[in-house]
Amino acid sequence: MKAAIFGATGFTGRLVAAELFRRNVDTLLLGRDEKALSAIEGAKDVRSVTLDDPSSLVDALRGSDVVISCVAPFTRLGEPIVGAAIAAACNYVDTSGEQRWVRRIYDEFGTRAAAAGVTLMPSATDDGVPGDLIAGLVVESLAKVETLRMHHGVFNGSISRGTMLSFGQIAASLPLAWQDGEWRETDAGTRAPVDFPRDGEQPSWAIPGPELITIQRHVAARTIEATMNLDLVTNVSLITDEVIAAAPAGPSDDERRASRFTIIAEARAPDGTTARGHVSGNDPYGSTALVAVEAAVRLGARGAPVGAVPPSLAFEPADFLNSLKPFGITWQVGN
Ligand SMILES: NC(=O)c1ccc[n+]([C@@H]2O[C@H](COP(=O)([O-])OP(=O)(O)OC[C@H]3O[C@@H](n4cnc5c(N)ncnc54)[C@H](OP(=O)(O)O)[C@@H]3O)[C@@H](O)[C@H]2O)c1
């Protein structure tokens, strides 16, 4: 199995590279700066490519079983990498949290990927893939689902420069939620408080959960929406160009260790029966690298369905989540 990373010089890309090296996966590091790529600890195979040269991108990806894209922001930069992956018959994973980008992957690239025999999996992050998987497991106990609400909790979190750039893209549109058979823009305001497993009741705001796009492909519900315990609208308004320029690449090791995340799936049947489950872990960026690499290694083995495929349909959900347990990512289903 051979994996490639695009954006290996970034904060997340470096963590992804380290995880691939830890697993002894044959890894090609791609980016625009060959010197910076070669300086990455453990780098053996590096190649400089630019996004405005599609044929060199395709050439670079030929022979890899999977590419993990860690560029930022995806909405602005992601397209050439997906296009090249499809042309090179290389499976594709990314670390995007941008909901509109995830939707584009499904709507615009899924059919082409299926024809080329490759699988696309955007949002292989701490919350994207685990959110999709826990949602699939939670609804198993209900004959019919009326509403599915995903609640994101981030505690002691600090964000990378790349995430700041992506927040700019996320804030440019209203959150999408699934309502009565279609995607609708919802207001980005407050929602009812949410009871988190370790942290108790937290305030909540509507967010554009990227996992909603994948969940809707396998859960038939009237409403699918997402909230978070942080007010992204207020936080994004504080992220100016000056703040981004002065920010470190990402959280320090101590900050990473202190930060935690939980994603809850809460489903309700038409008769009022409810089901709930959650996934929790530490260090959202380190966990994203673990999730992205686990997804990439599984797709690289080339047994998954082709096209843009929700994690719950590509993997056995409990098996995937259990593979993350040794790294402190735990899950539970039950009220
Ligand atoms: N839960 C989540 O939603 C979650 C978790 C983790 C990460 N993420 C996302 O992952 C993405 C990466 O974050 P990050 O913090 O790692 O970002 P970052 O440190 O800014 O890294 C971005 C990468 O993209 C490359 N890049 C930027 N512009 C480019 C261009 N024009 N041409 C070629 N390469 C370019 C950079 O290369 P250079 O080094 O050459 O500039 C770098 O390798 C963000 O969208 C972030 O939100 C999401």
Image (cartoon, grey):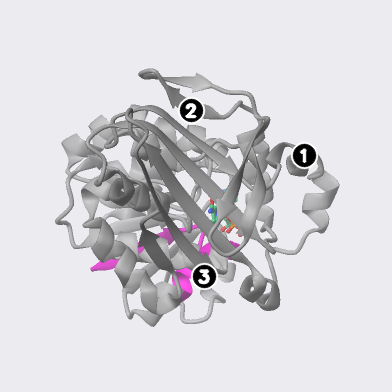
Residue behind label 2 places its C-beta within 8 angstroms of ligand 1: no
Q: Which mark is residue 15?
A: 3
User: Residue at the location (48% across, 28% down)?
Assistant: 177
Tell me where the magenta segment starts and ends, as one range: 1-18
Above-or-below relation of 221 to 102? above
Q: Earlier in the sequence, mark 1 or mark 3?
A: 3
**Residue beneath disc 1:** 234
Mark 2 in CB contact with mark 3 (< 8 angstroms) = no
Above-or-below relation of 291 to 124? below
Q: Earlier in the sequence, mark 2 or mark 3?
A: 3
In the picture, measured across the screen, residue 141 lies left or right of residue 74, that is: left
Quadrant of ligand 1: it is bottom right
Above-or-below relation of 45 to 67? below
User: Residue at the location (67% across, 57% down)?
Assistant: 159
- What separation in Å lies between label 1 and label 3 (alpha carbons)? 29 Å
Label 2 CA crowd tier, 10 Å (few <14, some 14–19, many 20+): many
Residue 89 visible in image: no
User: Residue at the location (33% across, 64% down)?
Assistant: 321
Instruction: Report the residue that reaches farthest toward the left.
Output: 303
Q: Amino acid at mark 1?
A: Thr
In the picture, measured across the screen, residue 74 lies left or right of residue 294, that is: right
Above-or-below relation of 85 to 322? above
In the picture, measured across the screen, residue 306 lies left or right of residue 20, that is: left
**Residue beneath disc 2:** 177
Examine the structure image and report whether residue 9 is included in the region drawn in magenta.
yes
Q: Secondary structure at mark 1?
A: helix
Q: Which mark is residue 329?
A: none
Label 1 CA crowd tier, 10 Å (few <14, some 14–19, many 20+): few
